[in-house]
Amino acid sequence: MNEWETLHSQCEACRKCALGHSRGRLVFGVGNPNADVLFVGEAPGAKEDELGEPFVGRSGKLLDQYLEGIGLDRKSVYIANMLKCRPPQNRDPLPTEQEACLPWLRAQVKLIRPRVIVCVGRIAAQRLIDKHFSVTKQHGQFIERGDYLMMGTFHPAALLRNSKYKPAALEDFLGLRERLGEMQK
Ligand code: URA
């Protein structure tokens, strides 16, 4: 087994929190294991839990559109979530669940070694960037963290609820494209 297969099977067997018992399928992550950009969402929803892949429901379709808008797709980036298992009724992940699951994300980051980590929504941004992170106020800002640049943007579910933020989200993705372009030079 290679490193990814080992990590995947260890994660599959994880029961560090109760969600490992209640979930349908593990939603480990998808995409290019050498991606320059890692997108981190919140947690699997019903569709993701059924199919075992992140962002495949309505939110995912919107995320795909934003990716496409800057010439990327889910095969060229890596997409994962803070939680690998679905919380019942799509409730917010508990702090204890986030702590239990974080080592899996850290291990993914270590293998991928992305240049940029994009936190998709409040839950990821507050856990990975700053516990007081405000998506409406701080979205699109690039913050240096050791080897990575971090950026927080709107969760597509929030954009589906409130489309007034869609232009701002597009700006965030355009900013990402610009940063990536600068890095290739
Ligand atoms: N919302 C998320 O944060 N992640 C998913 O995978 C699906 C919906």
Image (tube, rainbow, N blue to C red):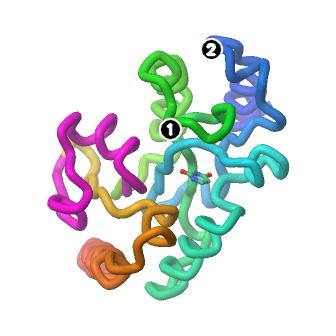
Q: Quadrant of the C terminus?
A: bottom left
Judge whether 22 appears above or below 126 on screen: above
Q: Is mark 1 within 8 Å of ligand 1?
A: yes
Q: Which residues make up the magenta segment?
A: 118-144
Q: Compared with residue 91, is residue 149 higher up or lower down, i.e. above or below?
A: below
Q: What's the amino acid at mark 2?
A: Cys
Q: Nearer the viewer, residue 152 or 4?
A: 152
| Disc 2 residue lies near ligand 1 with CB under 8 A | no
Whether residue 44 is situated above or below residue 79 in the rendered picture: above
The image's mark for residue 95 is none
List x then y, in percent, for residue 137. 15, 60
Q: Going by the image, does 103 lie left or right of 59?
A: left
First in sequence, mark 2 or 1: give its number.
2
**Left or right of residue 120: residue 6:** right
Q: Which residue is mark 2?
A: 17
Q: Residue at x 78, y 18 (%)?
A: 21
Position in image of residue 110 (x %, y %): 46, 36
Residue count near mark 2 (Cα–Cα under 10 Å), binned few <14, some 14–19, many ≥20: some
- At label 1, which amino acid type do we have? Met
Taking the spot 26% from the left edge, 57% from the top edge, the residue there is 135
* Circle 2: element type: loop
Q: Is residue 179 left or right of residue 1?
A: left
User: Mark 1: few, some, or many residues within 10 Å (few <14, many ≥20)?
Assistant: many
Question: Does residue 185 show up?
Answer: no
Q: Which quarter of the image is occupied by the N terminus?
A: top right
Is 93 placed above or below 51 here?
Answer: above
Front residue of 63 and 110: 63
Q: Position of residue 161 (x, y in %)?
A: 47, 68
The circle drawn on residue 82 is 1
